[in-house]
Image (tube, coloured by chain):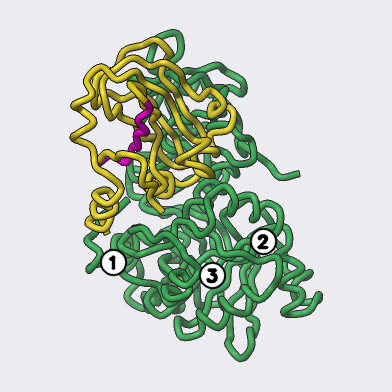
Chain colours: A yellow, B green
């Protein structure tokens, strides 16, 4: 269920490292907790973000939630297709539902994230 | 929403059914309730297209009986009950002396000297105390909430489903805000043609011990799917129905809630003087619908702005599955409660463009 090749935060974002870039999204658990996602506000390409900054807002039918930057860096690209079809995040949280790509400014921040096993244990603890 | 630890939450008689159906359960007014099964949007659209079955066992039922009950309720409720014949029911308010809404409810006349009140789950104890304090000593009061189960069947297919169960004659003769007693299998059930979705629909009342059997019987129809409280809320919001505790409460009067049509000024009732006084000047604020320009919705407590000035506050907001836009209800300074008026909804961070919409916000054609 939890992809092995990603890293995870306690706020349920995932990170995929490719060279000095990361792709960011929210986990399957997060989309399930939110329910039907109806709206997303994405960051602007080219902007700089600090770790733990709010980088996106996702809204479900009943509530709004922030998505936080797992690492600091520069936003290289955002998944604009989500704006017209935010339900993609529900349908494919780890693939088509990716939110943005960031050029990492401090790779040591990645060491503080959980691996799949760690995140799985973390989710168990929430039950 | 009332927050309780899981230990204190009450389960409805259908709890096992919800778990087996994979429902996501949430605390609501002290109860452990299904908020969704497959997803709010899916369940909402299914109810608008076919039929949805809702577990509403958390709501309260009071029985009142006695020679003075008609007089008592005429005084206690904003609408008259003396011209209500057995088999008919009415939406009404129970008001405090200041005209504030203690609860909104449906009053059923079950016989000449007997009535039933169906009240909100979160207000059961408050209502019970208020009613007991304000009825004659000869009027017998019984809180039947813990012994009564309530299931709602709502949606365009619900008429055919009930006809399939009971025959055309019973169902076709049952007009809106009328009720009758039926047998589902062997259980006597009260069938009321009322609801909270804006669709054709029914509310069924039965003993707690029969709830599972009635649920299974209705779930046996192909068009029926279980619907959670999430879609119940978006359905009522599209229909423009107020939710007690969000849109209406003791701080607001029926006039401010734009619900004067549910007040009978041609009789005496608690709160009447205050309402008459407010009516003279006209209420300063009015509960009004809005539709956002896009998919993003305002939420409860967002401020309403026009030309930079605060003119009201949002009381309910959600994504509308039918309109695919944000919708909601807000109290607006009276002069701005005009169809099509452009407003801005904000929580201080986000600004959402919207337009005033008269109720209902969405009407199924």
Under circle 1, the secondary element is: loop
CA distance for labels 3 and 1: 20 Å
Question: Circle 3: is it few (<14), some (14-19), or many (20+) Cα within 10 Å?
Answer: many
**Boundaries of the magenta span:** A10-18
Quarter of the image that includes the C terminus of chain B: top right
Considering every residue shown, the one lying at the far front of the view is A19
Work out whether disc 3 and disc 1 sit on a shared chain: yes
Residue underneath mark 1? B9
Q: Residue at x 31, y 13 (%)?
A: A48
Image quadrant in which you'd find residue A58 = top left
Residue underneath mark 3? B151
- Subunit under mark 2: B
- Residue A95 x/y as whole percent: 49, 38
Question: Circle 2: is it few (<14), some (14-19), or many (20+) Cα within 10 Å?
Answer: many
- Subunit under mark 3: B
Asked if residue A63 lies left or right of residue B40, the reply is: left
Residues at circles 3 and 2 in contact by the CB criterion of under 8 Å: no
CA distance for labels 1 and 2: 29 Å
Residue B280 in sight in this render: no
Image quadrant in which you'd find residue B119 = bottom left
Q: Depth check: A23 or B214 in front?
A: A23
């Amino acid at each position: 269920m939890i992809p092995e090749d990603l890293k995870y935060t306690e706020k349920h974002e995932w990170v995929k490292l490719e060279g000095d870039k990361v792709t960011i999204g929210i986990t399957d658990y997060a989309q399930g907790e939110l329910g039907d996602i109806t709206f997303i506000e994405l960051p602007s390409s080219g902007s700089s973000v600090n770790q733990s900054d709010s980088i996106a807002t996702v809204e479900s039918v009943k509530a709004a939630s922030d998505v936080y930057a797992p690492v600091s860096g520069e936003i290289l690209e955002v998944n604009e297709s989500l704006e017209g079809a935010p339900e993609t995040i529900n349908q494919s949280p780890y693939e088509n539902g990716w939110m943005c790509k960031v050029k990492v400014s401090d790779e040591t921040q990645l060491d503080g994230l959980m691996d799949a096993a760690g995140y799985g244990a973390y989710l168990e603890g929430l039950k | 929403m009332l927050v309780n630890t899981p230990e204190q939450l009450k389960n409805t008689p259908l709890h096992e059914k919800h778990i087996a159906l994979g429902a996501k359960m949430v605390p609501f007014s002290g109860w452990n309730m299904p908020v969704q099964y497959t997803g709010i949007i899916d369940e909402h659209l299914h109810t608008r297209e076919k039929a949805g079955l809702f577990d509403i066992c958390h709501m309260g039922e009071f029985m009142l009986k006695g020679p003075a009950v008609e007089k008592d309720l005429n005084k206690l409720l904003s609408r008259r009950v003396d011209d209500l014949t057995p088999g008919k029911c009415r939406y009404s308010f129970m008001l405090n002396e200041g005209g504030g809404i203690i609860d909104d409810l449906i009053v059923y006349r079950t016989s000449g000297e007997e009535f039933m009140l169906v009240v909100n789950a979160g207000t059961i104890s408050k209502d019970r105390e208020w009613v007991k304090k304000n009825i004659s000593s000869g009027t017998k009061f019984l809180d039947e909430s813990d012994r009564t189960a309530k299931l709602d069947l709502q949606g365009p297919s619900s008429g055919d489903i009930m006809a399939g169960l009971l025959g055309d004659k019973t169902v076709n003769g049952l007009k809106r805000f009328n009720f009758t007693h039926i047998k589902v299998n062997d259980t006597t059930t009260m069938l009321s043609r009322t609801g909270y979705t804006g669709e054709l629909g029914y509310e069924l009342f039965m003993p707690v011990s029969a709830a599972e059997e009635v649920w299974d019987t209705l779930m046996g129809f192909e068009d029926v799917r279980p619907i959670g409280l999430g879609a119940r809320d978006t359905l009522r919001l599209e229909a423009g129905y107020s939710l007690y505790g969000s849109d209406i409460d003791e701080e607001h009067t029926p006039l401010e809630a734009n619900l004067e049509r549910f007040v009978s000024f041609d009789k005496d009732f608690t709160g009447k003087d205050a309402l008459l006084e407010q009516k003279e000047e006209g209420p300063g604020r009015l509960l009004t619908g809005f539709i956002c320009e896009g998919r993003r919705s305002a939420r409860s407590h967002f401020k309403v702005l026009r030309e930079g000035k605060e003119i009201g506050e949002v009381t309910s907001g959600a994504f509308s599955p039918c309109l695919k836009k944000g919708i909601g209800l807000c109290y607006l300074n009276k002069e701005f409660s005009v169809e099509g008026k452009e407003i801005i909804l904000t929580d201080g961070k986000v600004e959402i463009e919207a337009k005033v919409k008269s109720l209902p916000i969405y009407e199924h054609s």
